[in-house]
Amino acid sequence: MAKPLLERQVNLIERLTSSAAIFGGAGGSATDLEGIDGALLRVEARFSYAKRMEKIAAVLPKTFELLGSSRDAHMRAFVESCPPTTLSRFENACQFHRFLLSWWKREAPDPPYICDVAALEIACAKVDADPERPLSDRTTDGDCDRTGSIRRCPNVILLRCAFDIRAIFEPAPEKAVPAKRETPLVIAMPPGADSPQVFEVIPPIFDLLSALDDWVDPYALPAEADFVNLVADLASRGLIEVNS
């Protein structure tokens, strides 16, 4: 008896996204999909897999590079445990990033700074996806009725890295090896910028930005005499906003 159409469609999708169809090996035949050429199915599976990897690599190019010889093993394990759920380039990259984080809980990351590199690439992609869209569900302008209140801009991401990885993202004649030191980074899209910008800030500024999740009266904060100038500078860099 022929299987219902919906069941055949589900089986087809499962087959197309399976490691057996993509990489070959046991279970690679399509005996449960009568009338479908198994060879063509494998071609389509590998093509779809390649497109998915292209999307992920476009968001995580440095991470892919740092995976080195272990990349194929990571890719196969990723395919086996994380079937695609969307066509979105960013969402596929986030899915792979979550997979890597799970992997690194079981095995030490190699090189050790790859965790910071992946986190920074995801943060840049998130800011670049839609600079005008808030990245969190924080309060909106309507929730603040006090003129002059300040908060961190909703599309700013704070990232506390264990390594100073910025040199990896800069053109260099030799392969950069990041120094191991706590590096507070801020990822933002300042006014007039056409791509995300990465700033290293001193710990007190990082802590201040971390505390500004919601609107705050600046006069309620313990501050030095030049705090007004600091607020103006942070606002000009697109890191905080002032309710006017």
Image (cartoon, helix red, strand yellow):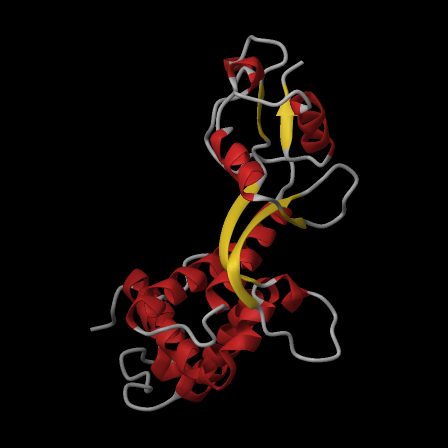
- Residue sitting nearer the eye, 71 or 36: 71
Relative placement, left or right, of 61 versus 34 is: right
Residue 79, quarter of the rendered image: bottom left
- Residue sitting nearer the eye, 158 or 85: 158
Q: Is residue 88 visible?
A: no
- Residue sitting nearer the eye, 24 or 172: 172
Relative placement, left or right, of 94 versus 7 is: right
What is the x, y in percent for residue 154?
56, 33
- Residue sitting nearer the eye, 46 or 102: 102
What is the x, y in percent for residue 236?
74, 32
Name the residue at the right extreme.
192
Relative placement, left or right, of 20 versus 55 is: left
Name the residue at the left extreme.
1
What is the x, y in percent for residue 131?
65, 40
- Residue at x 44% of width, y 76% of height: 110
What is the x, y in percent for residue 157?
55, 43
| Quarter of the C terminus within the rendering | top right
Q: Is residue 41 visible?
A: yes
- Residue at x 42% of width, y 82% of height: 22
In the rendered image, the vertical position of residue 213 relative to residue 23, given as above or below: above
| Quarter of the N terminus within the rendering | bottom left
- Residue at x 49% of width, y 69% of height: 114
